[in-house]
Amino acid sequence: MTSLAGKRIVLGVSGGIAAYKAVEICRRLMEAGAHVIPVLTNGATRFVGRTTFDALASERVQMSLFDEDDPIPHTTLGQTADCVLVAPATARVIGAYAAGISSDLLTATLIATRAPVVVCPAMHTEMWEHPAVAHNIATLVERGVHIVGPESGRLAGGDEGAGRLSSPADILSAVSRVLDVGEKRSDMAGLSVVVTAGGTREPIDPVRYIGNHSSGKQGYAFAEEAAGRGASVTIVTTVDRPSSLGASVAPGVTGMPGITEVRVDTAEEMATATAEAAKEADVVIMAAAVADFRPVDPAGVKLKKRDGVPVIELEPTPDILASLGASKPEGQILIGFAAETCDVADNAAAKLNGKGADYIVANDVTAENAGFAHDTNEVLVLASDGRAHSVGLRSKRQVAQAVLDLVVADRDGRANVR
Ligand code: CTP
């Protein structure tokens, strides 16, 4: 991840109880070597004194649009920042930013800047869940603003619920990630990428299904990494975006622009949606855990205990990866996964050959901190030309980054051969 050293960060602090945590964020940014310019709203100073930030930050606190030294402080701040971070962001600041209203120095700077913006909401659950706030967040996400949090937990006044400011550590790593994406080449710009995520659910009756432990974290990490590098991504998914990936979202909106979600449940639905999306795709990533078997004849009504132990006849589901491999358009790169519990390399090699994929990303789902539901993964990537790459234990986003680096190099190589 990009180092924060030398980066100019405008730290916007607005008026909520979580403003005291901005002091710790400021301190950690300074410790990481960033150049921090605090911009406080009037409300923020009700919760935390400007002297504290004056003492900790690289520059003195700025609050006024009408400064004695600089006639246009908001433009200067916006133009020179590498990142504008707002923590905490109140419903008012979020609303003003979404509506383009510059009511103070912070909101004016947000509107004036072209630097990446990270907004960390903190408010009471009722406010966070209000449709106006949800709408404003969705607007900001669509415009490319990165939203971090809020978390669920104890709030001011003793209430519990969603609305807590994310931890300073999470906020710093989000800023670093955002700067990383900003700095990276947009080496997937113009590419169309399809990713599948989550485990399929095969109905037994209207209330029960055959499923698996897949959380969708690795699939979403691929989608976000590809979108961050400029690709236009379709994610065919059985699950919502896992909140542990960092930036949180308003309901129904993925964490990053450039990603379209298609929701499915069963292997059959995933097969249809993926085949359709893959027709025009440059890269297809089958990260989903697709059930191999489904009940032949799901019951139309709930099976009752009193009727005895049911015997459920199963049939195979379509093998989506194998059929994509069989009908792969020229130039498309197809990536499959292999979730294994033993003989990882051999099983992965068999899948690579058997399914017509260009790469298989294999992991031992029994390894510590890797595989289903973990935030980290450790994989072996096998390529159809015989190359093998090990990617040691790291975040699922970093695993996605390593695999997509291979894909990009592969595409560049193919283009040079032509
Ligand atoms: N896959 C698929 N359709 C299926 C089953 C699996 O597209 N019906 C894909 C998965 O998305 C993954 C790859 O095939 O990319 C391998 O999945 P995995 O479950 O590891 O292997 P299987 O093919 O199901 O074989 P086995 O269960 O025997 O290991």
Image: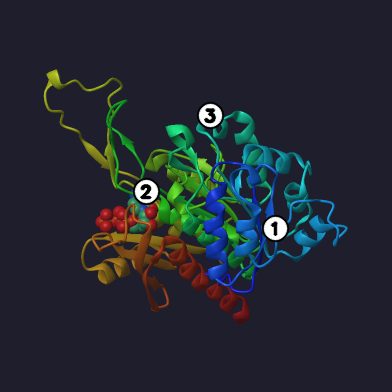
The x and y percentages for residue 22 are 56, 53
Disc 3 to disc 2: CB gap under 8 Å? no
Crowding near the residue tagged with mark 2, few <14, some 14–19, many ≥20 C-alpha atoms within 10 Å = many
Give the residue at mark 3: 126
Image quadrant holding the C terminus, namely bottom right
For disc 1, the neighbor class at 10 Å (few under 14, some 14 to 19, many from 20) is: many
Nearer mark to the viewer, of 3 and 2: 3
Residue type, numbered disc 2: Ser
Ligand 1, image quadrant it occupies = bottom left
For the residue pair 277 and 34, the one nearer the viewer reads as 34
Q: Residue at x 63, y 74 (%)?
A: 6
One can see residue 186 in this view: no
Q: What distance separates the C-alpha of mark 2 from that of mark 1?
A: 43 Å
Work out whether mark 3 precedes mark 2 in sequence or the reverse, and give the earlier one.
3
**Neighbourhood count class around disc 3 (C-alpha, 10 Å): few under 14, some 14–19, many 20 upward:** few
Label 1 belongs to which residue? 61
* Residue assigned mark 2: 215
Q: Amino acid at mark 1?
A: Val
Tag 3: amino acid: Glu
Nearer to us of marks 2 and 1 is 1
